[in-house]
Amino acid sequence: MHRGPHHSRRRVRRMALLGAAVVLALVSGATPLSPAPFAAAQAPITGAGSTFAEIAINQWRADSARQLGIQVNYQGSGSTAGRNSFTSKTVDFASSDIQYEEGDQIPAAGTYTYLPLVAGGTALMYNLRDPAGRKITTLKLTGRTAALVFTGEIRNWRDPAILADNPDLANRLPDRDIKPVVHTGGSGTSAVFTNYLSAAAPAEWGRFVNTIRSSGNPNWLITDPGGAYTSRFPTNYKGNVPVNGSDGVSNFVASFPNGDGSIGYAEAGYAIQSNLSVAFVRNAAGNWTQPTARAVAIALTKATRNPDGTQNLGSVYGNPNPETYPISSYNYLIAPVGGDPSKGETLRKFIIYSVTEGQRKAEPLGYSPLPKALIAQAFEALALIAGTTQPPPLSSVPEYYEALFAAPPPPQYVPGLEPEAGSAAGAGGAGGAQGGRSSTSADAAEQASAEQASAAAAAAAAAAVAAAAAGGLSGDQALIDGKLVDLALKPQSAELIAVTPITPRRWLILPALVLIAVALVPPIAATFGRRRRATDTG
Amino acid sequence: MWTDVEAPSASDPLDPLDVSINSETGSGVRDTPRTLTKFTSAEGAELIGSLLAGLSLTWLIFFRLTPLYGASGFVLMSFVTFVPIYWTVVRQNHGRLAAGERVAAVIMGSAAIAAVVPLGLIIFKVVAEGLPNLRANFFTETQQNTGPLDPASDGGAAHAIVGTLQQVGLAMIISVPLAVLTAVFMNEIGGRFARIVRFVVDTMSGTPSIVAGLFIYSVLILQFDAGFSGFAGALALMILMLPTVTRTTEEMLRLVSSGLREAALALGAPEWRVTLQVVLPTARTGIATAVILGVARAIGETAPVLLTTFGASTMNWNPFSGPQSNLPLFVYAGIRSSADTAVQRAWTGAFVLMGIVLFLFILARIIGGRDHLKR
């Protein structure tokens, strides 16, 4: 084809220009889809760590992006991995359920700080059907039975210990093996749960620690030198199922047939997401409770502050209040002291949003909001982070914690009586004051941090509104960064998590078949239709 | 010309499988080429009838005679009963030789179908799960404003699509020139060193993808403190793309006829001009195919980008700094979640990813079709 002598050179030049333009476009980054108006003052930040708080952090990440335009990324890689990533500075903040422990790469003292982010209860979620095929939703476990289950000393659902805890299920518990599901790797949820087990069932836990330590298996570690807890639950020990992350645990337990007869531990929000039944655990007062926001909040009134900013949960497990859920804990954010100011601005804004307005969504997501004392502690720690964004005054902080006590205590769960809507989401039947005992708020008045609770219980709604009105804010507004932000929730459907219903569309079958034909028929036709011919070897 | 091994017996009825005797030499000679895949209606009936017989016999065994159960066992046993039945039928009608050949053809055809059916099932499943949730906002929005309480239609994967395109694009920019030059070296220059290079490239193509990711993670991100970035992911993908593109390009360069090279050399062109202006343009479509195959290999790899790009829910236009998302990671993170909404979004992401790969393969076929190498 005659195209002239310079045609190929012109083509080459055009292709080169086109190629360069493509490269420049890809790499330049100038775009209309760029993030929000505040791009200059704040940089995107990345965090990693606990899956315990992952649901809440993801919600706050999305909400603060919507309200404040900041960009936060978070990956739930596990508490230990998050802490180590923070130390090696590959992420800007970490989320962890425990403080740095022996075996972690610990950063230099004074270069990091803990601050409390949210409280939550570790739920024991299970998937069990009776021999008639009906779901069991009212399983009860004492701390000792739970320890026996997870340390492998009980292997069958009809073991006498479980039957003793569940006399009303004596005819319904199936004769099957228990599959305990544990977290792999360094998990903060494992640490929190085993800490409870060591307090609630010291003999059983002690036996387990001794067995593990004398087994000689290098993969089985008890990460706490004192043996009080472990971040790495020994995996494949006596048939337990190791799964990665809280998501993995709830997915496995909910799956069929693998998860049938299994029981796992993860934050209560995961049981809500996977629609799993949550076991009632016996608290120190002898009542059976589930990890509702209120039960967790009441339990944590006995937490005391450690010097480094974390909370000591030693007295939480034995809290004598009749409404507590014993396996309650806090989740902490590990932030760098000083550092990049633009990243610090974003981190400050994110933290301020999370501990103030973000706590509104703690209860719907399966967590428990922070009390004022811990919000104040978070604001104090904020001063160490780089940046200039200031937290709002403590008096103007929305009072979601206090609102938990505004309502009258829910009715006590009586074994043998089905609680309302058996799954965790409907566990309003958790705990509760017994017949003649004094109300919750009177008991809680003995502790310092619960004074707000009793005051709020007296006139909680009025108090919240009064505080807001005093600050010039309406119920749905908050003062963040000196700006009045309207934080009204989008109208939500009755279901907690709106799921787009997927209806099978039969008209899709034809396009799917067309796609398959397009992909498959030509090679088949080519193979079968081809006639053999001599090839040119030129 | 095919010659028959056994002489036909007089009782065999005449049919295309049969032989006729060559009157001159007296040996059995076939008049028309035998095609094992063309069936007359009678032979088709034999095949279908035997299939039904196999199925019925297996149904009898599974549901009436034994306590065996399971779909896969049923399929396997019906195949195992079908083959002898078919052999018997064909032997009855056409003779032992024809029976053996037909059974062999059927077994090979079944193997081909068994190899292809999983692909069809995968495509169907991904389309059925991913298409319903596909909306325009999937391509324009990110997950920045989407939390656990939002419905599945909220947000999109624009950040993942941009990330994939950028990372694969960067990997392509780095690896394609390297690969083409390596292939040119191996083919045009040759020699002992070229053999060593060829061996190394072949070995490199067997690198597990997670090892490529681990390597970049430990060297670039940990040791050099570069942090997670799309560029680190691009480097990990480049390690996987390079051997594929190199080997295919080398094959394509080999197909260029040496007559062209000799003609150019005879006209007085130096070696580099011959390569640049004669060999490479001739193999142009082959190289394009090689590049597209390399890209299609790299675009769906999850393991290397898992460790190097870290993933993000926000848009990151700069691949050189900051974590970036990409489609395989988007799908992986979504599927692992316990929230139904995230799982639905992941299926849609898988559908989009599959669409991109399908598009690339179709492109490769189209380009490969207009091939200057085959005459």
Image (cartoon, coloured by chain):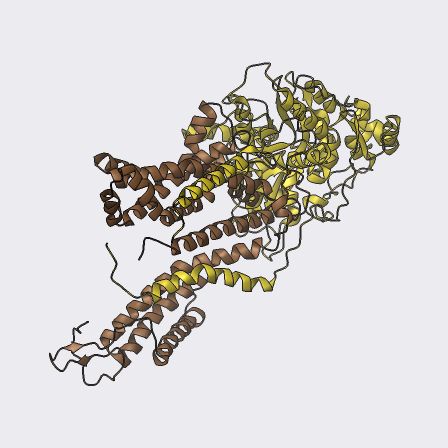
- Looking at the image, which residue is at 28% across and 81% down? B93
> Which chain appears brown?
B
Quadrant that contains the N terminus of chain A: bottom left
- Observer-nearest of B64 and A183: A183
Question: Viewed as shown, does residue A77 lie left or right of B113?
Answer: right
Reply above or below: A187 against A241: above
Query: Residue B20 at x, y = what percent?
Result: 19, 81
- Marker count (numbered): 0
Quadrant that contains the C terminus of chain A: bottom left
- Looking at the image, which residue is at 45% across and 27% down? B220
- Observer-nearest of A230 and A184: A184
Query: Residue A522 at x, y = what percent?
Result: 41, 62
In this view of the protein, can residue B203 be seen by the observer?
A: no
Q: Quadrant of residue B131?
A: bottom right
- Observer-nearest of B312 and A107: B312
Q: Quadrant of residue A396?
A: top right
In this view of the protein, can residue A88 be seen by the observer?
A: yes
Question: Viewed as shown, does residue A170 lie left or right of B174?
Answer: right
> Which chain appears yellow?
A
Query: Residue A373 at x, y = what percent?
Result: 75, 22
Query: Residue A66 at x, y = what percent?
Result: 71, 36
Q: Residue furthest front?
A: A4
